């Protein structure tokens, strides 16, 4: 019973710290936020913070942990045509755009702020891993090509994040289904050329 109470308390503390950081990001530039402001807003002590996190970057990136599982489930659940099974590799794309759209105030703040580089890299690494897991057995190495599997999946991850960044910087944001269709139009030829 004691362990359960500690787990709940830990979850509550982590949530309070994450919420505090996000609310501060709506008010000021990420780089200008100091740990003490997060602690004051979350009503958490400094030693408790450092029990869980190294710094505010660690706190920010931890907020992405649930995202990977949600995207993996979307990728698995994506129905695909048997002649285009390679589309499952990017089966997460619509779910990611919908998630970003549902949290557009936060994503817009991130994209336009100094924390975006770190968040973008974390999401990109997550997507690359998802695509690696799905694409490894489908990748066909052509004798005439210098493109390695690693380069292939990193290209796809970077392409997705470029589209998402552009989407949030665009003056009149497109609905998730439309931006997803544009992303797919850009990468499906690459998928078709490199996967069975």
Image (cartoon, grey):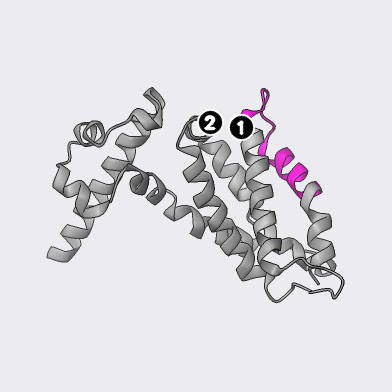
Q: Which residue is mark 1?
A: 168
Q: Which residue is mark 2?
A: 108
Task: Tell me if 19 is positioned left or right of 125 in this view.
Answer: left
123 over 89 or under it: above or below: above
Q: Quadrant of residue 24?
A: top left
Task: Tell me if 142 is positioned left or right of 137 in this view.
Answer: right
Which residue appears at 49% of the width and 34% of the height? 110
Give the percent coordinates (x, y) of residue 85.
77, 67
Which residue appears at 44% of the width and 54% of the height? 66
Q: Quadrant of residue 51?
A: bottom left
Residue in front for this viewpoint, 184 or 49: 49
Magenta stretch contains residue 171: yes
Point out the stretch of residues depicted in magenta: 168-185
Task: Tell me if 113 is positioned left or right of 163 in this view.
Answer: left
Give the percent coordinates (x, y) of residue 129.
57, 63
Give the percent coordinates (x, y) of residue 181.
76, 44
Which residue appears at 63% of the width and 55% of the height? 92
Q: Quadrant of residue 166?
A: top right
Secondary structure of the magenta portion, mostly? helix
For label 1, the crowd category at 10 Å Cα-Cα, with few meaning under 14, some 14 to 19 and many 20 or more, is many
Quadrant location, the C terminus: bottom right
Q: How many marks?
A: 2
141 over 188 or under it: above or below: below
Regarding residue 1, the answer to whether it shows in the image is: no
Residue in front for this viewpoint, 177 or 27: 27
For label 2, the crowd category at 10 Å Cα-Cα, with few meaning under 14, some 14 to 19 and many 20 or more, is some
Q: Secondary structure at mark 2?
A: helix
79 over 173 or under it: above or below: below
Label pair 2/1, CB-CB below 8 angstroms: yes
């Amino acid at each position: 019973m004691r362990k359960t109470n500690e787990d709940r308390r830990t979850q509550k503390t982590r949530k309070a710290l994450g919420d505090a950081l996000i609310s501060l990001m709506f008010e000021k530039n990420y780089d200008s936020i100091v740990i003490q402001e997060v602690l004051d807003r979350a009503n958490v002590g400094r030693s408790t913070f450092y029990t869980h996190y190294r710094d505010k970057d660690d706190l920010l990136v931890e907020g992405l942990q649930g995202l990977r599982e949600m995207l993996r489930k979307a990728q698995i659940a994506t129905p695909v045509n048997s002649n285009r099974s390679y589309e499952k590799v990017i089966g997460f794309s619509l779910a990611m755009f919908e998630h970003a759209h549902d949290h557009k105030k936060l994503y817009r703040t991130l994209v336009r702020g100094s924390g975006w580089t770190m968040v973008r890299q974390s999401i990109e690494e997550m997507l690359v891993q998802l695509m690696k897991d799905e694409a490894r057995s489908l990748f066909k190495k052509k004798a005439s090509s210098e493109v390695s599997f690693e380069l292939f999946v990193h290209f796809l991850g970077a392409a997705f994040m470029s589209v998402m960044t552009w989407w949030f910087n665009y003056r009149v944001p497109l609905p998730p289904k439309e931006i997803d269709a544009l992303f797919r139009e850009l990468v499906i030829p690459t998928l078709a050329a490199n996967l069975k």
